Amino acid sequence: MEIFHNANYDFIRWRWHAITLSLVIVLAGFAMMFMRGLPLGIDFSGGTSLVVRFSQPVTLDKVRDAVAPLGGEAVVQQFGDASENRLLIRLPQQEGAEEGTALEQGSQRAEQALKSAGLPSFEVDSREIVGPVIGADLQRRGIYAVLTSLAAITIYIGFRFRFSFGVGAIVATLHDVLVTLAFLMFFKYDISLNVVAAILTITGYSVNDTIVIFDRVRENLRSRRKDPLSQVVNQSVNQTLGRTIITAGTTFLSVLALYLFGGEALEGFAFTMLVGVISGTYSTVFIASAIAIILSQQKGGKPQAAAAPTGEASERSGRKQRRARAS
Amino acid sequence: MMKNLQWRIGLIVAVIGLSIWAFVPPEQKVKLGLDLKGGVHLVLRVKTDDALKVETDTTVDRLRDSLTRAGVAFSKVEAVNPTEFRVEGLQDDAAFRAQAGDADAVYDRASEAGGYSYRMKPNVANQLRDETVTQALETIERRVNELGVAEPIVARYGARDQILVQLPGVSDVRRAKEIIRSTARLELRLVDQGPFPTREAALQAFNNNLPPDDEVLPGKSEGSGTGGTAGSAVYVVKKVSAVAGNDLRNAQQSLDQFNRPAVHFTLKQDAAMRFGTFTEANIGRPMAIILDGRVMSVATIQGRITDSGQITGITREEMLDQVITLKSGALPASMDYLEERTVGPSLGQDSIRAGVTASLAGLALVVVFMVFYYRLTGFNAVVSIVVNLLILLGLMAAIPVTMTLPGVAGFILTIGMGVDSNVLIFERIKEELATARGARAAVNAGFDRVWWTIVDTHVSSLIAALLLLQFGTGPIRGFAVTLIIGLLSNVFTAVFVSRTMFELILSRRQQAQTLSI
């Protein structure tokens, strides 16, 4: 069985359409971010989050009324399956909460408010209180980690292939990060620690498909030095299309299982991965190669001159491949 | 060729056996994080400025004393902030310098009109801060052990003044937090005047002009009620304590003369000597026992006391907690909580159940897809995924790596991302089969040509995972480590295990032209 047998689509022709579509999504995400602010979870913004399990079913509105006098924008939502009567209550950072015991006042006041509101009895299943110092520290480290990861991967790809490919791969990966953020905005997910972990995983994963295509481009360039680069790239994308779709598909299936069955706490993580995997496949086919071609052409060199593989590592793999061919 | 194959199969079986041996039974051998088994995770900040302030205050006191004794004229020796103090109104510079030599080792001196300003040397301050955090860490460790928590974690964390405390299975979070945080600084100081009903009243008694070596501290009024519910009062006490926090030798539960709960403490030998001299010199004067800046009790010194004393007028709970905190020693500085995460055991149980369901569902989906798409060769991939997961579990149990909720996600991702390598190899073999040079050549070419692709994809994923490890805290680190182990063992299973299986099948057929792929 085979999908995309002898596929021959002209992806390169669609590159400007693809880039436009991506820009629209990313800009829409930015616009929402600009209007509503980045929806940081309490891991980053600081604040209190309680998971409360009631002995009997309660309506969200009653709980909202109970915590309303606490001020700030309290969020009350169902946590997990409806039959468990678990609710998530999130309170924003209290003013001047840095000093001493003030940190836990938010949670104490919330528990007190629930007790005195005449609701069924309850137990606190989980309590998370994050002070602003920790939040700010994590924000900084999260941004640093994502950027360093992007830079390190660019350098590695640049070293293994060539500079323009490295840039192509990283533009595609950055694209995936931004598209994922945009979808998190569209679907109103908070950016939590787990979501950032998923975004970092995406930076490592989404470049995988790109590497497969670039490997094939390098191989094809060796046997077909006369053809223009864009044609070679397009052919390589087509040749590897089947595995691009299948590898993304298997990852998508496992993440889908996580999204459906993994429980409330991992939902944000799973959603981020789902979007990231789809975006990664799309960007591999449409964005990465397009950027590589655009950059190679802008250097003004003839295709074959620009196309020669560089670097010791690729020489080594070239030898390896010649040996394989000889066997 | 056959011999080589036997050796490879032997190695694979040994690895599988070792892995299973390492993690079975999983309930005992796979460590669970707090988010799965329940417990509390705390991050504290040590206010290292406190320790610097003590150092500066002590230096100021000592300098003021020796200047007075040597008859050097000055108008003011005063701490400005935790790391700085000022000397003003000097007339005889040489005489001052003769007395102030000690301070130069710790402070940088700058001349000012009629005096000097001293600022703590940065390296000394850093060292002092570092020692303070280390001391706090050791003290917390002792307290947590006294609490009787199984497998606690107390470690430095993030920025250099932060400490992480993880207490699995603790239910009374509030008490644990109080015990960890209480400075337990026991001081014995002379009382100048008191008790007063309010702070204003106390200041009034001194015409709002408190002597520089006095301060006002809150406390309880003596003798009001027997249940320990004393009224509040304030005392004017000397700033200097006869004993320091680390002078305490032991503390134990005891009863006072009215059979009420009390804490009996004993002092270390050198402190006892000092305390003996101090009490002898102050017979007849009232002395306060002060715990964490609060006057616990005041008694008149009847005679020379050497090595022991009693804290009275407390409840039973206070007694139990004070014994723990005093026994474990004073904290060198006060602390703030920056973060608290508590997970109840029932939520953890539900998370484990959801994680197992999701893992099985993910595995089932991928297995069905691979067998449907690659037929018999699909089983090859299935075996390599399963071996991959066994090695992952085995290594997690052996290292050991704590399994966290995000770690479960890493486990599931290993299923989906790990099989990618198999797909790359299988697709390549398909392509090579089309050139009709026989199945064996196709398999060889497939593995050889994809090898560097697999290296490249794994390196880029590893880069991201390593940065995740560096970025993350507890649970996220669990995820990163799971991902890293999964990636490494995937190279072994997708290349070595899978290829061995291909060769096993091909070795039974002489002239294979096709594969079920």
Image: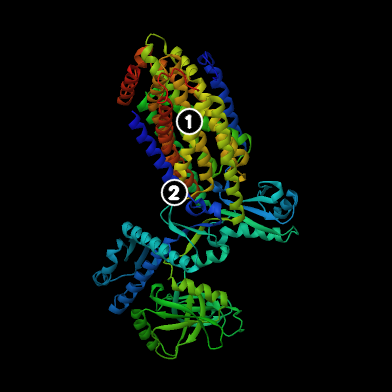
Query: Which quadrant holds residue A321?
Result: top left
Instruction: Give the left or right position of residue A259, taking residue B190 as reference.
Output: right
* Quarter that holds the C terminus of chain A: top left
User: What is the tally of numbered marks visible in this picture?
Assistant: 2
Instruction: Judge whether B230 appears above or below B343 on screen.
Output: below
Q: Are marks 1 and 2 in contact (CB under 8 Å)?
A: no
Subunit of mark 2? B
Instruction: Judge whether A315 appears above or below B27 on screen.
Output: above
Disc 1 element: helix
Q: Amino acid at mark 2?
A: Trp
Marker disc for residue B380: 1
Q: Amino acid at mark 1?
A: Asn
Instruction: Judge whether B173 appears above or below B353 on screen.
Output: below
> Pointer 2: what residue?
B21
For the residues labelled 1 and 2, the Cα–Cα distance comes to 23 Å
Disc 2 element: helix
Which of these two is toward me, A313 or B79? A313
Figure coloring:
rainbow
Subunit of mark 1? B
Tag 1: Cα neighbours inside 10 Å, few (<14), some, or many (≥20)? many
Tag 2: Cα neighbours inside 10 Å, few (<14), some, or many (≥20)? some
Instruction: Give the left or right position of residue A281, taking residue B450 as reference.
Output: right
Q: Position of residue B265 (x, y in %)?
A: 44, 80
